Amino acid sequence: MKRRILLLLAPISVAVLIWSCGGAQPCGLFCPAGGAPNVPLDKVVDIHYCDGRNRTYRLGFDGCTSEMVADPNKNESCLQCAPPNVRRLPFISFFPGGSFNLLAVPSSFRFSIDPSEAMLFSADYGMPVVNYRDWTGMVVGSGTVSAVAADGTWLDASPPALSQAFTGTYTVHFNNIDASGQYILVGTATMEAYGREPPDSDGDGVPDYMDCAPYDPSWSSCGGGGGGDDGGGCDPACIMY
């Protein structure tokens, strides 16, 4: 009986050991606005941790976030040393505006923000950081900021290298740098790019990067089916064979 108990406890002990050595741990669900609806998904919360970290998190539809983490191995803590600051991300427009041609990318974009917004562009502690992301959320590259308006209402930034980019929607994240050298998310902008369609080797209407069988037009997803009717896309679990 004693041996059986020890055998039963062993997996639990291993699991606890793995959890304790797994680095950053979640701080739990956090609803700084009392769970108020965030239907436009434009609200964020600024967190000032007692360990010196300043972080900004997006809030979900329910006005909550579960992204807050702390790594005890780095002396990080979930404790907050200032009231959370909930704010709305402003709309940021860009010139030339609307969309741009991937075959003739401008050398610089001008991004503008309404002067009535609570947070504006700032170069007080260094030039803002501009990151461009594709439709999957992956960072395509960063743009160099060459100028920031004295009143914080606009900045000029170069595009990243887009020679391998394809037609689609891109988002731009703008971060100010605070006195401690950390990033503060100011806002986001959406850009439409055209001029270079992604390759579709088998001609089934599903781009290679979304096609589980890029050279077989008879099917494109794990469920089979041909063409673009199945929506494309791959479930990694079903192509592990």
Image (spheres, grey):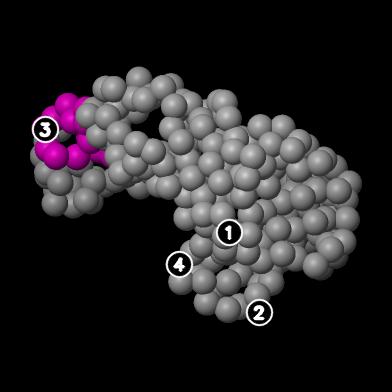
For residue 34, which numbered disc appears in the image? 2
Q: Mark 4 or mark 3, which is nearer the start of the sequence?
A: 4
Q: Mark 1 or mark 2, which is nearer the start of the sequence?
A: 2
For residue 190, which numbered disc appears in the image? none
Screen quadrant of the N terminus: bottom right
Q: Mark 1 or mark 4, which is nearer the start of the sequence?
A: 4
Tag 1: amino acid: Glu
Disc 3 and disc 4: Cα gap in Å?
Answer: 37 Å
Disc 2 and disc 1: Cα gap in Å?
Answer: 23 Å
Quadrant hosting residue 109:
top left
Q: In the structure shown, which secondary structural element does the residue marked by tag 2 occupy? A: loop
Q: Is residue 24 left or right of residue 114?
A: right
Tag 2: amino acid: Gly
Label 2 crowd bin: few (<14), some (14–19), many (20+), radius 10 Å? few
Q: Is residue 19 left or right of residue 162?
A: right
Q: Which residue is mark 4?
A: 40
Q: Position of residue 224 (x, y in %)?
A: 18, 47
Q: Which residue is mark 1?
A: 117
Mark 2 or 1: in front is 1
Residue 209 belongs to the span the image colors magenta: yes
Q: Which residue is mark 3?
A: 203
Tag 3: amino acid: Gly
